Each structure stands twice: as structure tokens, then as C-alpha cells.
Amino acid sequence: MNKDFNPQFKRLGEILVHQGKITEVQLNGALEDQKTTSSKLGEILIEKGYLSEDELIGIYSLQLGYPQVTEEELFLADATVVKLIPEDFARQNMVMAIRKNDRSIMVAMEDPEDLAGIDALKRLTRLNPEVYVAGVSALNRAMDELYARIKQSGEVEEVLEGITVISGDEDNREEVDLSPDKVSKEDAPIVRLVNMILQEAIQERATDIHVEPQRHQVVVRIRIDGVLQIIMSPPISSLSGLVTRIKILSNLNIAERRLPQDGRFTIKAPNREIDVRVSVLPTVFGEKIVLRLLDKTGFDFTLRTLGFDDDSYEIFRRVIKQPYGMIVVSGPTGSGKSTSLYASLKDIKSVGTNIITVEDPVEYQLDGISQVQAHEEIGLTFGASLRSILRQDPDILLIGEIRDAETADISVKFSLTGHLVFTTVHANDAASTITRLLDIGVKPFLVGSCLNLVMAQRLVRKICPHCKVEYTPSAETLKRIGLDPKRIAGGKLFRGKGCNKCRQTGYHGRTGIFEIILMTRAIRGLVYDNANEDAIRQKALEGGMVNLRESGLRKVITGITTTDEVMRSTVEEY
């Protein structure tokens, strides 16, 4: 290497060749390309794969004489310093604050010789900028993370000012102030931590919060669009405080650590009320807590927005307008069964009908409908509620779930005596829903007579609209999911590449996929004959039933969801 070579007096290409990063041939090719584009030389070399961004920034640092800052160092920047530069200014000038002292502010810049930007920075912060050089993509990733964290922290402080927690059960309610200044200095950090967890879960549309003790840390996960995501991992020393705080909010026994406990509390925020169901379970590393968040306001779903295709929508809407009979929706916990039933009631309710529901819990509150909350601990079971409801002159009933023979028997009798009954059953698909009713103890001739329609459903995540991109699926992927390449227009499907809007998952929101068995004469005949679920499923498919996998594939083809989501939510039929 030439000792007289001074990179500060050489062009970028010369330095790169001298350092052995690229060859003369590669440099000349890139310079030719530069003549026909507006791109910088470094950008062209990176695009061609001759150079990494880190290598380019290292050479840039040698040429300009500014120290280099790595992406790891950017992510470790103090958020209180980062927010000294407004996000709009930072992104426009590709500059991010790292740290500061009384006189200076250390900043990372893509172009450290942007004198106008440095002058504006000096006026903005009233500090002397000390400039480091960093890559564009590293700056963008760090700014995405840090400014999102700053924004979230600010929103937490703002929203928590308007939050009230009501502790305990329905009969013994007590308001609990969440603000840290209302508790001792020792407890204040734990209060802040619980507040942060609750607020982030609410802000991110989470349905559940999991506080899970492990050997060396506590993992806090929230379920967004049906999938758990880690939001923080505080040290194991915080577990006792977290559990105690949540138990106090839930009016549970803080001294009992060996037995499971269940409680609840309500969060009242501006324009929202969220019912929180709490479950505490002892594990080998400590007590695990799961909180289920039920937003009791703002039910804005309709049958059209659930995700039905046109044919299924017409069938379902026609059946729910029948004067009597039973409609059963099945699926695992969290598959959207209750949402579908609420949307059905919303579609058919009128001044002329008396609609009553029995639920545990009441997930949404709807005007014009009488909703009963079951309380098994005081004897208000589904069966006891239904016997009383019969004297309330109902036209339409929603029974939250058929769990036992008593509830099933009453539900069937209601549907056979001039009432329209909506209910749910835990089953894997539409055909097994029918056999599940038989297993519970309902006679075949009663099941065949009362059922109007059986629907199985799942929820799949929708592709994030902000980072949706086309891609060509591999033949192996299509074969694995059973999708004929001829069905794909142009051979392209869609997926999300991940962005700040979707927490880098590529998904935002969910939609339903459905499998509907309309109780035709042929299907009823099989039920009367006590046929198995395979025979019922085959007859339904011959009659035009779209199974769950096919329903999902149709949403893949139309760019609503992905093959991975459909495979995660459905099974292949052999």
C-alpha cells in the first residue's frame, strides 16, 4: 500500500480501488452507469453488490475525515437526546442526534458536509454539532425505531392522564388511581411498568396480554391480530411487583401464590371502556398472568365487513332472516365466532323483535338488545338464565356457547317452538359441529329438525396495505398449499415486507374465512341416520360447500392474505 496515499485528497472511486474494495473494471462500469442515472457512485456500487453500505461509509469516513458511527451505536442513542431534533427535520436532512453535553450535540449524518443542514441544526438545538457519518439505511432503521418509541412514550403519558381503573367485581367496585404519584416511591416504578404494558396493549389493538416468568427474566407478550409478540422483557426481580400490582387491581388475594385465581377490572379511558379479565396461574418460575382485553364499546362490524364472499354472504344473510330454527357457528377460541353472531343480530334487529342474549362474558354492548351476563359462581348459569328468559317473550336468542347437555337441550327446544336461536360450539369444522351436538347428547332427529345452518370460521391476518408487495411464489409453496398456478393471474401473489405501521410483521388487521353447511334435505337425511362427519362433509362438498382451506385460498389469490396465513389457520384435506 502506498504510504503517500492520502484519502482526503482523493476521489471516492480511487480510494475504493486503493483499499481493494472494488476493481478498476467495477469502478469503470459503475462510472458508465452513473452517466445515465442521477444516482451517486456509492449507491450504484451497493446496488450492483460490489460493496456493502458499512464498507462505503468506512471509506467515506476516511475521505472526509469524520468518524464513523455503526448501526448498533445508533440504536443505543438516548431517546431524550434523539427527540431534541424533530422527526420531520431529522428525516428531511438525514440526521439523528446520538448524545450531548452542555455545549455540543453529537449527530450522525448521511452527508456530513451539508453545511446548510448543520447551520439549521445549530439554530434548532442551540448547541454545536459534532458530526459523525452513518449510512442511509442504518439511519432510517434507527429513526423508525427510536421515533416510534418516543411517540409511544408521549402517547402513554398523555392517555394515562385520562385513565381510571375500576377494581373488583360487579357488586363491589372500587376506583383505583393508576398514577405513580399516588403510591409510595418504592412502588412507583412497578406502577409505571404496569401502566406502560396496559397502554401499549390498548394502543396496538391487542386482545390479550401474557406476563410470563422465565428463569432469568419476565417476558411480556401481547396478542395482535391473533399472534403473540414480545413487547418487553423486564428482569425476573420485577415479577413479584408486577403480580402484586395486577392482583390489587383485580381484587385478588396477594398472599395466595400456590393456587390459580381469576379476577377482573375495568379500564375507563376517554371514549372507551375496556373490561380486563385476569387469570393467574402458578408455574415453576412464578405466577403467570394472562389478561384478556374486551373493548365493550365501538362495535362497528357488519356482515359485509366480516370477510364473506358474495355467495356465502347471500346464503348466510338469507338464513338468519328465517323466523325460527338454529344457527350454529363453530371454531376455536379467538376465531371471531361472537363477532359474527353480533353482526348477525345487528343486521336483523328491529323495533318489532325482542332479542335477548346470554353470554359469559358480554363482549360488546348493543343498543336495542337485552344482554344477560352469566355468573356461574352465584348460580346464574346458562341453563338457569335460559329458563327465565323463556318467560320474557323472546323472538330471537343468542346463547354464548353450548357447553353441556342442559344448555343444548334448552337451545334445541327453543328453536323448535318458534324461536330463532344463534349459538356457538367448539369444533374444528362445519361437519364436526353437527357430530359435536350429537356427542353432547342431542338426539339425531332433534339436530336434523332444528338446524338451519352450520358455519365454521377462522381469522387470518390481512396483508399490511402500507408495505404490500408483489412476489412470485415457488412451485413448492403452491404445491404444499394445494394452489393450482393457473389460478394466479400473472403468476404473482402478495405479501407484506414489514414496516413501522405493522410492527415489521407484514400484517395489519384480520378477516374471516368461512365454511358453511346449509341444512338441505340430503344433509338432514344423513343426520337422521346418525351418519359420521366424513359422510356429512362429502355430501356438503358435493352440494357446493367451500371448505376453510379453499376460502382462504380465494383470499390469497385476491391479495388479501398470504399462503403462510392460510396454512397456519387451516388443515389440508386428504
Image: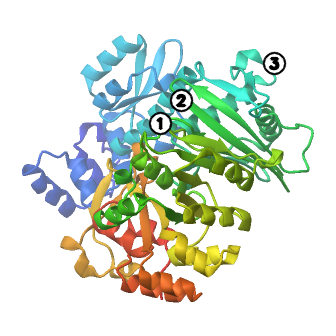
Q: Are marks 2 and 3 in contact (CB under 8 Å)?
A: no
Please tell me how crowded label 1 is: few (under 14), some (14-19), or many (20+) other residues with Cα within 10 Å: few
58 to the left or right of 111: right
The image quadrant that residue 372 belongs to is: top right
Q: Between disc 2 and disc 3, whose residue precedes? A: 3
Q: Are marks 1 and 2 in contact (CB under 8 Å)?
A: yes
Viewer-side residue, 443 vs 15:
443
* Residue picked out by circle 3: 184
Point 66% across, 62% down: residue: 410
Q: Are marks 1 and 3 in contact (CB under 8 Å)?
A: no
Numbered circle sitting on residue 272? 2
Mark 2 secondary-structure assignment? strand
Cα distance in 3D space between marks 2 and 3: 29 Å
Point 61% across, 66% down: residue: 412
Q: Amino acid at mark 1?
A: Gly
Residue 115 rendering spot, x and y as whole percentages: 26, 22
